[in-house]
Amino acid sequence: MTQPLLNARPESHLFYQTRARRPVLAEARDLHIWDVEGKRYLDGSSGAMVSNIGHSHPHVLAAMRAQMDKSTFGYRLHFETDPSERLAAKTAALMPEGMEKVFFVSGGSEAVESALKIARQYALATGQGSRWKVISRQPSYHGCTLGALAITGYGPLADPFAPMMRVMPKIPAPRAYLDGLDADDPATGAHYAAMLEAEIIAQGADSVLAFIVEPIGGASTGALVPPAGYMQAVREICTRHGVLLIHDEVMCGGGRTGAFLGGDHWGVAPDIIALSKGFGAGYAPLGAMIAHDRIVNPVLDQGGFAHGFTYAGNPLACAAGLAVLEVIEAEGLTANAARIGALLKSRLEGLMDRFPFIGDVRGKGLLLAFELVADRQTMDPLPAELNAYVELVELAYAEGLIIYARRTRDGRAGDHFLVCPPMTATETHVDEIIDKLTAALSAFAPQALR
Ligand code: PLP
């Protein structure tokens, strides 16, 4: 029985972060979404950097339908499933050498929790029980569950829950553009990496379990690309102090940056990887934690991994994930993300001539962002009262363009906006994004230039 689509109603029983309501989605195809009133939107942020291969891809829908006819659930303690075996093998083949074992979850926070827990169990299994601290960066975002929040450097989400968790040490994210440093100079990378070593020593190296880092920043830093040499130096410091290196690839993994993993750009292999978002690409709640055999084997040899989610390895989700990887491969979408991303980035940089309140454009591939500032020389943020991160998103939404914004609110960074369309984007889509964004920025200019 087909129910008619309802439009958003104030008396709805739904709630998320706020009472704000959005139009009801009617249909989504590739880069476009239509609401029930027939208005068309270009999904310029792939939702929350999720829909990497565009919406309603026929290959994925067909794979899901075929799987649905066989089974939609097989409990992991009772059965293996063909899609989960295949997806694990295909995923492992995309990981750095020696990372052969894949642990499925249903989202990014679960992937990060799983990474923290296997790290701790590895320490216990190898006689390093004194290690439990996980160093992360400020700002950062690693998820909304209490374990992931303890390592998240984003006050508005983490602070209310501080008494309920063991808040972990943070080091500054390498925001060279705010510190007036040259990101291409290896001395800059060494400068920020030295902060990690200093923190490990200050905490006592034998108490430090891991360092977690987004190779290319997501919403918290607005597509921050680390300075030259940073990722390699961090790897070396972790190895030297026996600290595990966790790459949070939840947002930057999956091909969006022009390489399957963000860490691939620097040829750096971590010990543990968290994946989600583009891995299920919006077709199914899916994520994975992948660890090197030298981490997994001691844990499995000594009583097993004390962790697991009911929906882990769900065959329908895994069939979707497998089809997503097939599409990325068959359509050369990682290379397309690099090519179209370079074009989109240069077009965003072009907007800086017209709009002096754009302070910075950054990112790699199709993980791109721009930041609004009061003054491009000092990089002072726009006044918080302007609420730019809300206002500009609304103006773009009115134009039919979806972008994703954050104000880091740590007293330094301004409002930043992620422009991250699906990896299927073409030159025509780039034109549409820039036209709509230009209209939104023009409408916002009187406030920004006041
Ligand atoms: N890690 C990173 C880098 C993220 O960007 C996110 C979500 O935005 C998460 C973890 C948490 O993922 P999820 O919202 O799927 O739990």
Image (cartoon, rainbow, N blue to C red):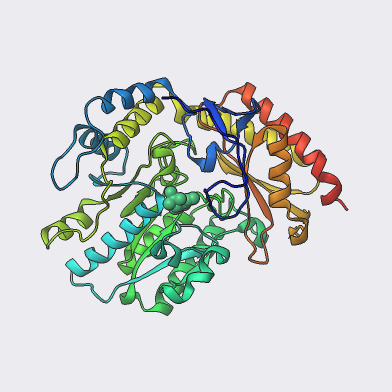
User: Measuring 70% from the left and 31% from the top, which residue is drawn there?
Assistant: 434
Question: In which quadrant of the rendered image does the N terminus lie?
Answer: top left
Task: Tally the numbered discs.
Answer: 0
Vertical arrangement, residue 275 with respect to residue 169, above or below:
above
User: In the displayed structure, does residue 86 sit left or right of residue 403?
Assistant: left
Q: Position of residue 175 (x, y in %)?
A: 60, 58
User: In the displayed structure, does residue 357 sit left or right of residue 299?
Assistant: right
Q: Position of residue 303 (x, y in %)?
A: 12, 62
Is 91 in front, or is 309? Answer: 309
User: Measuring 18% from the left and 72% from the top, which residue is drawn there?
Assistant: 127
Picture quarter containing residue 267?
top left
Q: Position of residue 349 (x, y in %)?
A: 70, 39
Residue 405 seen in the figure: yes
Vertical arrangement, residue 321 with respect to residue 296, above or below:
above
Residue 215 seen in the figure: no
Q: Position of residue 288 (x, y in %)?
A: 32, 46
Vertical arrangement, residue 154 with respect to residue 417, above or below:
below
Is 176 in front, or is 126? Answer: 126
Picture quarter containing residue 369?
top right
Is 18 in front, or is 187? Answer: 18
User: Measuring 63% from the left and 33% from the top, which residue is drawn there?
Assistant: 344
Is 430 in front, or is 311? Answer: 311
User: Measuring 76% from the left and 41% from the top, which residue is drawn there?
Assistant: 352
